Image (cartoon, rainbow, N blue to C red):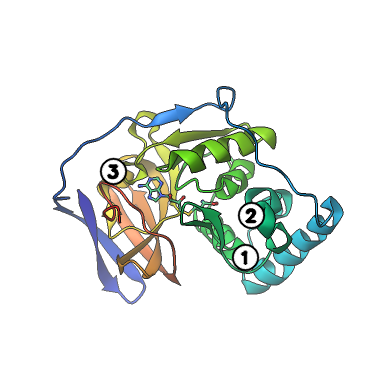
Amino acid sequence: MCVTIYKESPRKWLVRSRFAASGRGAIRRTPETLTVQESHYQSLPISVSPTTNEFAKLRQSMVDSQLRARGICDERVLEAMLFVPREEFVPEVLQADAYGDWPQPIGAGQTISQPYTVAYMAQAAQLRGEEKVLEVGTGSGYGAAVLSVLVAEVHTIERLPALAHRACELLKKLDFGNVHVHIGDGSLGLPHEAPFDAIIVTAAGKCLPSAYVDQLTDGGRIVIPIGQQKSSQHLYRIYRKRGEVIADDLGRFAFVPLIGDQGWESP
Ligand code: SAH
């Protein structure tokens, strides 16, 4: 089922419980959970060019010129972006460009979001430190690592097993111990770990999956890109408060599609 978002005023959108049938056979698999201890995959080769120190300088420059200068002002988010070594999460051949102001390919036709988008979504989720968070779309694991610094517990779900295993191994190697990686269709949320204080969706849906609203604590936030076209979406922050669900339109963004029961059909 899908929740439709209605425009109420220029920047306020009201989420109504008008459910649309998905129209697809509901074969629902229980998500598989990877624990960092059990993962048996080889770690990625880590290149050290530029040097660790040069990467640190590039990271600082990224925070100053791409984030602070463009209005990211949550100091905890800025610190997390300064802490996480993004170069570890991109393919070895692209490491020199790890702090570029653009998304990068991570294999399987997927991308790691540009630094600004990662920081913007984390800031939009209004995280204070005690939260249990669900990230939909693990990809490289970079977004999960940033969230790991900001909250108490992160659950991240990825539909492509190869990406999930690789991210899990990397997060283990880098000691992001409060991240739990799951394999499955994240368009259905992660019911057995719900409720979540925040749900951050890093792939774009056609609509807001109702499962996310159901799996959110009272006062919780969902940050999700939604668009009727695969190439262009708006990012929304959706609050659930005392039974009411309200959405803010945060503007136009571009994400890869959310593929699954409550998202787009697999190409
Ligand atoms: N957060 C990631 C960005 C990944 S891009 C990072 O920091 O690298 C979005 C990811 O969402 C892709 O890896 C894609 O495979 C995944 N995805 C798409 N639909 C999904 C679904 N229904 N459930 C889980 N993951 C999904």
- Residue at the spot of label 2: 77
Circle nearer the N terminus (3, 1): 1
- Residue at the spot of label 1: 72
Identify residue type, mark 1: Ile
Category of crowding for the residue at label 1, using alpha-carbon neighbours closer than 10 angstroms: few (below 14), some (14–19), many (at least 20): some
Identify residue type, mark 3: Ala
| As drawn, 217 above or below 231 | above
21 horizontally vs 249: left or right: left
Can residue 130 be seen from the camera position used here?
A: no
- Residue at the spot of label 3: 211
Q: Residue at x 29, y 55 (%)?
A: 208
Q: Nearer the viewer, residue 199 or 54?
A: 54
Circle nearer the N terminus (1, 2): 1
Q: Position of residue 89 (x, y in %)?
A: 63, 49
| Quadrant where the image shows the C terminus | bottom left
Q: Position of residue 205 (x, y in %)?
A: 33, 57
Q: Quadrant of residue 215?
A: top left
Q: Quadrant of residue 144?
A: top right
Cβ atoms at labels 3 and 1 below 8 Å apart = no
Identify residue type, mark 2: Val
Q: Position of residue 166 (x, y in %)?
A: 56, 39
Circle nearer the N terminus (2, 3): 2
Measured in 3D between alpha carbons, the distance from the residue under mark 1 to the one under mark 2, in whole angstroms, is 8 Å
Category of crowding for the residue at label 3, using alpha-carbon neighbours closer than 10 angstroms: few (below 14), some (14–19), many (at least 20): some
61 horizontally vs 229: left or right: right
Measured in 3D between alpha carbons, the distance from the residue under mark 3 to the one under mark 1, in whole angstroms, is 29 Å
Q: Quadrant of residue 194?
A: top left
| As drawn, 216 above or below 265 | above
Q: Nearer the viewer, residue 20 or 124?
A: 20
Q: Nearer the viewer, residue 144 or 244?
A: 144
